[in-house]
Image: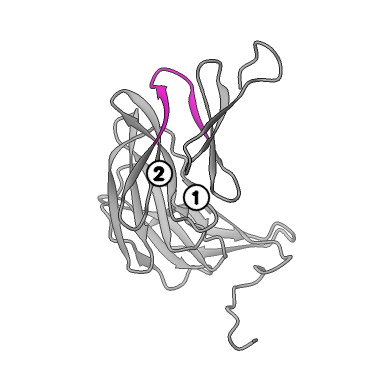
Amino acid sequence: YVGNQRRVPAPFGEAANGLVAYSKGGDIYTVDPTTGARRAIVTGATAEADPAFSLDGTRLAFTRTTATGLVVVVADADGGNQFVIPMPPQANEFAPTWSPDGRWIAGVTETDGDTGMLSIADTVYRTARTIIGGVTDYPEIYWRPPDGRQLAVVARVSGELRIALVSPGDGRIDLLPPVGYAGGQFRPGGWTPDGSRFAYAADPGGWVHVIDVEGVGDVVIPPSIAGAGG
C-alpha cells in the first residue's frame, strides 16, 4: 500500500493545512498559514502572477508575461518541471481555474469590456481550445462537481444572459433555460455538492433560483422579508 500510494508534497495530506501560493514582485511564493514560513518557488527575469494549486496540491498553474501577452504555465507544486500550455497569449488578466480532477485549466479573458473569451487547457495532452461564444464579464468559472465533467459560465446570447454548461473535452455548449437581460441582475451562485443543481439570482427582485440541470426544473426562492431582494 505504501509503495503504491500517490505522494504529495508536505504539508498537503489528510488533516493538514495546505500551503498558500501568491505573487509578489513578479515572483511566486508559498506561505504556510500555520507557521508563517514563506518560500520563493518561481523566480527569474520574467513576471509571474495568478498562481493556483490543483485541488490535490500536486501542481501549480500561473501566468507569465511575455512580449506578446500572458501565457499559462503549469509546474510541480514546488515550481519545478515547468511547461507552457500551447494556447494563444492572453491580452490581459487570465486567472487559471483547475477542474476537480486536476486535468483541465480554464479561464476567461476580457475582450471588449463587456464580454470575455473562455479558454480551456488539457494539462495531460498539453493542448488548448478557445470556446467560441460570448462569455459575460463575470470571470467566475464553476466546475461541476464531483468530477468536473462540465463547467458553468454566464454567456451572452442574442442580448440575453444564459447559464452555459461547457464540456472541456469537446467544447460542447449546453444552454440552460433561465434567461436574464444584459441590463438586469443575473448572477451565478454555484453548484450543489452532487452537481445536480445550480443556483443563480435574477430579476425581478434579484430572487434566488435553483435549477435542476438534468430535469431543467427551476425553483424560485423568494426573499424571507417582503420587498427585499436576493
Check residue 165 in the rendering and tell me which mark sits there, or answer none: 2
Label 2 element class: strand
Looking at the picture, which amino acid does disc 2 mark? Leu
Relative horizontal placement of residue 187, taking residue 14 as reference (left or right): left
Q: Nearer the viewer, residue 170 or 137?
A: 170
Relative horizontal placement of residue 110, taking residue 185 as reference (left or right): left
The region drawn magenta spans 176-188
Q: Quadrant of residue 168?
A: bottom left
Residue 32, percent across and down?
Answer: 67, 60
Q: Quadrant of residue 2?
A: bottom right
The quadrant in which the C terminus is found is top right
Relative horizontal placement of residue 14, taking residue 8 as reference (left or right): right
Q: Which of pointers 2 and 1 lies earlier in the amino acid sequence?
A: 1
Mark yes or no: residue 224 visible. yes
Q: Is residue 213 above or below residue 79?
A: above
Label 1 element class: loop
Q: Are marks 2 and 1 in contact (CB under 8 Å)?
A: yes
Residue 117 part of the magenta-drawn span: no
Residue 118, percent across and down?
Answer: 34, 44
What's the residue at 34%, 63% (across, down)? 84
Residue situated furthest top in the rendering:
227
**Residue indicated by mark 1:** 144
